Each structure stands twice: as structure tokens, then as C-alpha cells.
Image (cartoon, helix red, strand yellow):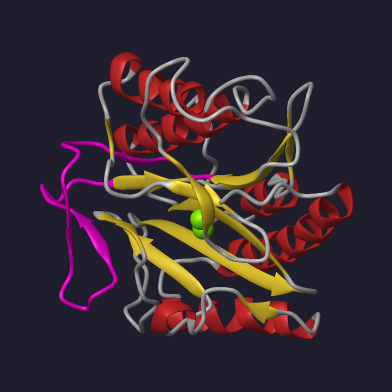
Amino acid sequence: MIHYKTQAEIEKIRKSCSMVIEALTRVADLLKPGMDGLTIDAAAEEVIRDYGALPGFKGFNGFPSTLCISKNESVVHGIPDDVPFTETDILSIDCGVLFDGYYGDSAYTFALGEVDNAVMQLLAVTRESLYRGIAKAVEGNRMGDIGHAVQHFCEQEHKYSIVRELVGHGIGEELHEAPEVPNYGRRGMGSKLKQGLVIAIEPMVNMGRKSVVQARDGWTINTKDGKPSAHFEHTVAIGKQGADILSDHTLLEAAIKNNANLKEVSLKN
Ligand code: MG
Ligand code: MG
């Protein structure tokens, strides 16, 4: 069952998302080669708890951490560890917050300073595909319009592969609510989008083939072919004129720009 949100509820989700973005911005300030996942996980958790909020992922189905950190060939759900980051790592970092009864959820794939241009292009295309999907998140469209926009850009225009097993989701009083939000689909198909629907759109895009496997830790999802994967996510509210992005990345991207150890994700790369 889909829970459509009132504007007051949407503002609560925006508040939780703003804490997610503050936590990810803190991460962007800290990232450098030699840094490790446990350190940035603790820093993100501190930002969230300083607001009296709760990390949305910690304890969710037993997940141990505030952040999901998924390196290189890992797609999503990586567990932060003490392995130092290297100058060629890409890191999908996903964060959720629960505050005042509502969740926020957003993710960004960060690139350390020596990531090669082919991988930077994967990141840029994945990021752009998220915005292509969001552009279709308008009342009167259907879920398949979002998935088609993401899939067509990544697979037809850029010859990457969309992960099929993992999808976006409704969000609100639960981290994962109905409906599912696939990153693939057919135009004009699927459920109708209505004002008040709040969803997390989160393309997961592989440089090589689409197949994924779960690691032995029971969480991390890796590409089967070992090639890199990228992941970007926004929480958005469907409106009559367009989508309202509740997890604005402006602050986060400014922090990336100011950190000389990180490369900016841009289609101009
Ligand atoms: Mg997420
Ligand atoms: Mg999500």
C-alpha cells in the first residue's frame, strides 16, 4: 500500500534528508587516500546524533553501520571497514537518517584524485541518469517513465548496464515503503505517479555486465565481472509541475569541489 504524504510530512522528510546531506558533506570534507571507512562512518554518525537524530541504516535488518560504503566493484550495501582508501578508489556512500518519525535517504559516488577518465565517465553518466529519472517524476507520468529514462540514457546512449536486482523505493515513516522504483522499464507502464508520493530514486550502473553477486559478509553486493559500479540517490516528492528534490546535493558538491583529494563528477570529464 502506498502512503501519500501531506506537505507537512514532506517537510519532515526534507529535514531528515538535510541531515543526510550534512553527514555526506562531512564525509566529503574528510575523504583522502589513507582515510578508512570506519573513521568516516563515525564522523557521519556524530553529525546525525548531534541533531538528536538516528542513523537510519544502523540496526536496519541488522546492518552494523551508519553508512554503506561500496568501493569500486561493489555496487551497494558495503560495510565500512579499516582498509585505507587509495587514490584510485570510487566510493558509493549511502546514508539514511530517522528524525521526528520520518526517514531521509541519499547516496553519492565519490572519486579520489587519481580515478581514470573512463571510470569518471561512468560516474558522470550515472549521476546524470538520476536527474533524467527525476525529470520524469511528475504527476500523471508512470513509474516506467522514470525507469525508462534512467535505463535508456545508461544502456542505449552509453552502453553501461543497469543493475536489475536492486531498485529504489517509497520512503517516509519506513525506510523502504511501496512502491518499488526500478531503474529500468517501459514508457507509459507501471503505476501512476501522484502528488504526495515520495520516492528514493537510485540508479546503480555497472561499467561491464549487469550481473551482481552477494559477498560472503551477507551484505555487500558486487559486480559479477569485477568491473566498477556507480550509485547516486535522491529522495524526491512527486509534484504536479515537477519533482521536489528533498536531498539537494549543492552543499555536498561544493565540499567535493573544495577537497583537492577528490575529483568532481561532471559530464564534462
Ligand atoms: Mg540510500
Ligand atoms: Mg535508498
Q: Which residues are magenta?
A: 201-228
Q: Main secondary structure of the magenta part?
A: loop
Q: Answer left or right for 26 relative to 157.
A: right
Residue found 74% across the figure and 25% down from its top: 242
* Residue at image point 22% right, 57% down: 222
In the rendered image, is residue 132 in sight?
A: yes
Q: Position of residue 261 (x, y in %)?
A: 52, 57
> From this viewpoint, which residue is outermost toward the right?
8
Q: Nearer the viewer, residue 246 or 101?
A: 101
Q: Residue at x 72, y 84 (%)?
A: 49
Q: Quadrant of residue 156?
A: top left
**Residue 262 in view in this figure:** no
What x and y, as percent, mark residue 105?
A: 60, 58
In front of the other: 172 or 232? 172
The image quarter containing residue 99 is bottom right
Coordinates of residue 209 in the picture (x, y in percent): 16, 37
Q: Residue at x 62, y 81 (%)?
A: 45
Nearer-the-camera pick, 160 or 144: 144
| Image position, residue 6 (x, y; %) | 83, 49
